[in-house]
Image (cartoon, grey):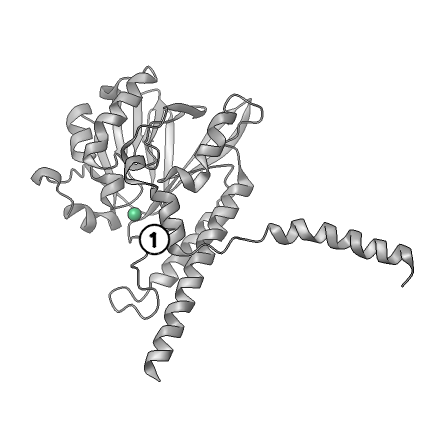
């Protein structure tokens, strides 16, 4: 090998290194869970409410993603979180200059207390209609903060449209994390261009989930895989999620006001799906190997 070829080889190696560095970090379900939930303080602590894009605003805490979508006929609230979070959401709505009583419609990411427990209180305070997805119903029936029945004013299904005034959202069932886990799609405008927004329901595998040979839910792996496919097919420009770490809100927040809008992040969306898929596959393989070892 002459000197030039050695230099070329070294140069190529230097080029390859950053590509390898971009491989997915090996995050297990526990790592993803911790990343999403943060500390107990972060679950409750208000994050500065802010404008995301067009008619969408962030009103959640440091680790619970809640969104206000304004329309010509009042507002849509996505995720009421824990019942104890509702006063924080109300404060955020008011700090943005809106009224909590103008919320006319409430929808949620999935039937876990950290996203939908506050529905009854939020409805009480606003008079809004609570729209739930059919597969969320069994979980929501069991969710009774202070003994309150979970309000369910209308039940919709996968692919259904939910409209308030001039805004329409589409419900995409993305199960696995729960049976009723739903990702909500809408299209917004900025600078005369259309952008597709999706509020990811969740792709998380909780640390206690049984993926391999789960008699209570034999289809759980199939559910997760169908959800990755559903979300990938959506070609999303602006990913949002039931936990703001799903779209790296903390990194994007300081860039608000810059051009382009930091929340426009198709690559980040695909990266998040890939991270979740990898964590699910790592756990599945781990459980399969453990089961084989036990059978020997
Ligand atoms: Zn959950």
x, y (%) of residue 212? 35, 68
Residue bearing mark 1: 175
| Residue 8 located left or right of residue 210 | right
**Could you tell me which residue is drawn at 35 percent across and 20 percent down?**
72
**Could you tell me which residue is drawn at 26 percent across and 17 percent down?**
99
Taking the view exactly as shown, the residue that stands out farthest to the top is: 97
**Could you tell me which residue is drawn at 20 percent across and 29 percent down?**
122
x, y (%) of residue 191? 55, 22
Front residue of this view, candidates 96 and 141: 96
**Neighbourhood count class around disc 1 (C-alpha, 10 Å): few under 14, some 14–19, many 20 upward:** many
**Could you tell me which residue is drawn at 33 percent across and 61 percent down?**
220
Is residue 173 something that shows in the picture? no
Q: Quadrant of residue 154?
A: top left
x, y (%) of residue 3? 90, 57
| Residue 96 located left or right of residue 143 | right
Q: Quadrant of residue 85?
A: top left
Which quadrant is the C terminus positioned in? bottom left
Kindly state the secondary structure of the residue where label 1 is placed. Answer: loop
Taking the view exactly as shown, the residue that stands out farthest to the right is: 2
| Residue 154 located left or right of residue 207 | left
Q: Is residue 219 above or below residue 64?
A: below
Taking the view exactly as shown, the residue that stands out farthest to the bottom is: 296
Is residue 224 something that shows in the picture? yes
């Amino acid at each position: 090998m002459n000197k030039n070829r050695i230099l070329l080889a070294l140069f190529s190696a230097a080029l390859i290194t950053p590509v390898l560095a971009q491989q997915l970090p090996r995050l297990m379900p526990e790592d993803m869970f911790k990343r999403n939930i943060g500390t107990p303080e972060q679950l409750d602590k208000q994050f500065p409410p802010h404008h995301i894009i067009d008619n969408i605003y962030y009103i959640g805490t440091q680790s619970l993603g809640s969104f206000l979508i304004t329309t010509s006929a009042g507002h849509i609230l996505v995720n009421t979180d824990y019942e104890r979070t509702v006063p924080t959401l109300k404060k955020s709505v008011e700090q943005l200059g809106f009224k909590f009583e103008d919320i006319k419609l409430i929808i949620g990411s999935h039937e876990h207390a950290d996203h939908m427990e506050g529905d009854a209180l939020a409805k009480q305070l606003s008079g809004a209609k609570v729209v739930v997805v059919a597969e969320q119903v069994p979980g929501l029936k069991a969710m009774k903060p202070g003994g309150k029945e979970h309000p369910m004013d209308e039940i919709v299904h996968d692919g259904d449209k939910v409209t308030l005034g001039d805004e329409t959202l589409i419900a995409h069932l993305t199960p696995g994390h729960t049976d009723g886990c739903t990702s909500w799609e809408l299209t917004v405008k900025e600078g005369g261009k259309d952008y597709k927004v999706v509020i990811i329901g969740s792709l998380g595998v909780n640390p206690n989930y049984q993926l391999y040979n789960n008699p209570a839910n034999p289809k759980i792996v199939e559910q997760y895989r169908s959800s990755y496919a559903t979300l990938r097919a959506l070609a999303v420009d602006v990913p949002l999620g039931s936990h703001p770490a799903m779209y790296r809100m903390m990194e994007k927040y300081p860039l608000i006001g810059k051009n382009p809008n930091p929340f426009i992040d198709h690559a980040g969306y695909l990266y998040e799906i890939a991270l979740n898929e990898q964590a699910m596959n790592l756990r599945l393989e781990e459980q399969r190997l453990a089961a084989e070892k036990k059978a020997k």
